[in-house]
Amino acid sequence: MTAPSLTHLPDADFLLSPLTGWTRAHWETLADRLLDGLLPYATPGLAQYRLPGPPSHSGPWSDGLEGFARSFLLAAFRIAGSHGRVGPALIERYAAGLAAGTDPHHPEHWPPITDRAQPMVEAASIAVALHESRPWLWDRLDDTVQSHVVDWLGGFVGADVNDSNWRLFQVITEEFLASVGAPHSRAEIDAGLARLDDWYRGDGWYTDGDGRKFDYYNAWALHLYPVLWARIAGPRAQTGTVDRHRARLRAFLTAHQHFFGSDGAPVHQGRSLVYRFATTAPLWAGALADATPLPPGRTRRLASGALKHFAERGVPDERGLLTLGWYRPFLPVTQRYSGPASPYWASKAFLGLLLPESHPVWTATEEPGPVDTADTTLALPAPGWLLHSTAADGIVRLVNHGSDRLPPPPATADDSPHYAKLAYSSATAPDTPPGPDNHIALLAPDGTPSQRGRIDPLGVHGRRAGSRQAGGIETVSVVHGPWEIRVHRVDAPPGTPVREGGWAVADDTGPPIAQTGPGRALARRADGLTSALVALYGWSDADGTVVRSLDANACGRHSATPVLEGAGPLLVTLVVLGADARSTGAGATVDADGTVEVHFPDGLRERVPALSGRPASSPGPAPGGTS
């Protein structure tokens, strides 16, 4: 069955786009579909979009503003990208909504911008949209409406802002106020930009506030907003600041291009995953700011691949709406701040429409992405990640030894399945609520597993990464092709039960097939995607099992995870995800000094030293350290 989102799309052009078939016309058509889908949910004055679904913790009033602001961003890119050559109804629709929403006496007026409140987020989208569509919207608003808009946005001046990517919402909004001659605080703009510098960890990576908070907020916020700010600020922006942001974006894109599978799927990690293809926003931002190392044909291949991936899986749905989920509606990927209109931050993916039709990103022939052509292993010391991808199946896997999203010590918090797992991929999602997948735990007498807790990174280098976690478990991962071998050193009383899980594979067509035996377990999806877990050392007579779940996974209703349970101070496991689940030939030997030599199925060998601490040859922390 053809997904509703694929109906009425232009014909594919495999001469210009040999990998995806998609062109600028596909992007414009899908943008129009998303905007049209919202109309039945508009309030009479067009100031709010009250979409179906559970409200966020901010409530329906704020959620209605969110629907306007985030879709206005999409409308602005569509209007500006076509130089206003869109149906006049689209421009009139958002002009009317601005007039009603910012009029304090109108029944649809927006909630005010107050300290640490959700309207701060939406104000930034409105400011960007007003700037980008200025000749067709702002410049044509009458003086009273402009005054109301300025008064509403001006609530940001002097307000208390969350110390995270929210600082950039203040930067953006107040810079727009400056651009129209309205009251603003240059000191607050400068302070927000300076705070961004505090969070920089090197190699293009920011943590989103203090701590080790690495995720896609690097993509759709921390790198994106500086580019948008520079467009608004123009000559007011200091050249050195702009150049610094551009250099960091260029470095980030060198790695970010590796986060997309050959089917276009982004690696499924972190919060706010309902934004889906917003992961492509920095690809376009790099082209827009002349700050990308990528050839233009590769930029479009990656971006179009991601948009097409979701469109083929029913995004948007038959109503033309973006739902709270990954493919189908799936509330466990949401957060307290997620409301029915939150997914429309995906509008950021359409930033590329600001580039003219004649720009090389739209005219160059598509070029393969990194995963399309070769197996890759990429060490990312700043976030504590290790990527390994395979061209044969097009899967990207992320080994996580650095991002936990916990506040700085001594604060603690419960594990999040989108941060605490040992690994994530472009083909899978973690079971949510948390299951045993990609987790090693000590088991209490009642069977309760320990949490990973705060991740203490030990370093990332070459094909190796390591960390310590709560409960006295130290893990070093070594990757090669589709395989990961994990060496666990467990500091616990003798006989303490230990449980480890492999990848959770999920399917909508039915439960994955399970195969188990002594020291091994396997789960295989109908299309052949296989997750395997094999005991290589220290698991004694552990029998493999497969844990099944229903409606616990964003990638499919039926999920299954291979699991081992045993005990021992030193445990070595082969973990496999891919079409090639070979394990024959894998093994591990332990020297007298405790050094572990691991052997991969194709014969590659690596030695993991016994010394507790950083993996051998680790470069240590990235410049700037961590909080």
Image: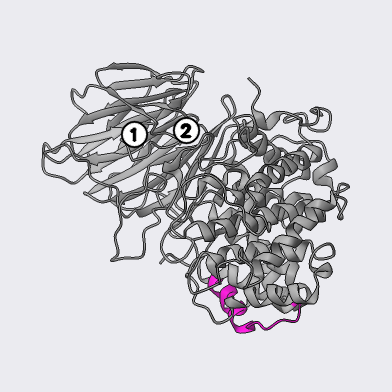
How many marks can you see? 2
623 is higher (above) or lower (below) than 484: below
* Residues in magenta, as a range: 179-197
Q: Tell me, yes or no, whether the highlighted magenta stretch contains residue 606.
A: no
Q: Whole-percent x and y of residue 623?
A: 50, 65
> Residue 264 vs residue 442: left or right?
right
Sequence-wise, the earlier of marks 1 and 2 is 2
| Residue at 65% in and 44% down | 40
- How many residues crowd mark 2 within 10 Å: few (<14), some (14–19), many (20+)? many
Q: Quadrant of residue 70?
A: bottom right
- Provide the residue designation for mark 1: 597
Q: Nearer the viewer, mark 1 or mark 2?
A: 2
Do callouts 1 and 2 mark residues in contact (Cβ within 8 Å)? no
Q: Quadrant of the N terminus?
A: top right
Q: Position of residue 301 (x, y in %)?
A: 72, 38
Amino acid carrying label 2: it is Thr
Does the magenta run of residues contain 181? Answer: yes
Q: Which mark is residue 428?
A: 2
Secondary structure mostly taken by the magenta-highlighted segment of the chain = helix
Left or right, 592 with respect to 169, comes to left
Kind of element beneath mark 1? strand
Q: Residues within 10 Å of mark 1 (few under 14, many from 20)?
A: some
Residue in the foreground of this view, choosing between 400 and 434 = 434
Q: Pick whichever, 172 or 45, lies toward us.
A: 45
When the figure is inspected, residue 374 is found, relative to residue 164, above or below; the finding is above
Q: Secondary structure at mark 2?
A: loop
Give residue 90's position: percent from left, percent from top.
Answer: 78, 52
Which residue occupies the foreground of this view, 236 or 481? 236
Instruction: Please identify the quadrant where the C terminus is shown.
Output: bottom left
Three-letter residue code for mark 1? Glu
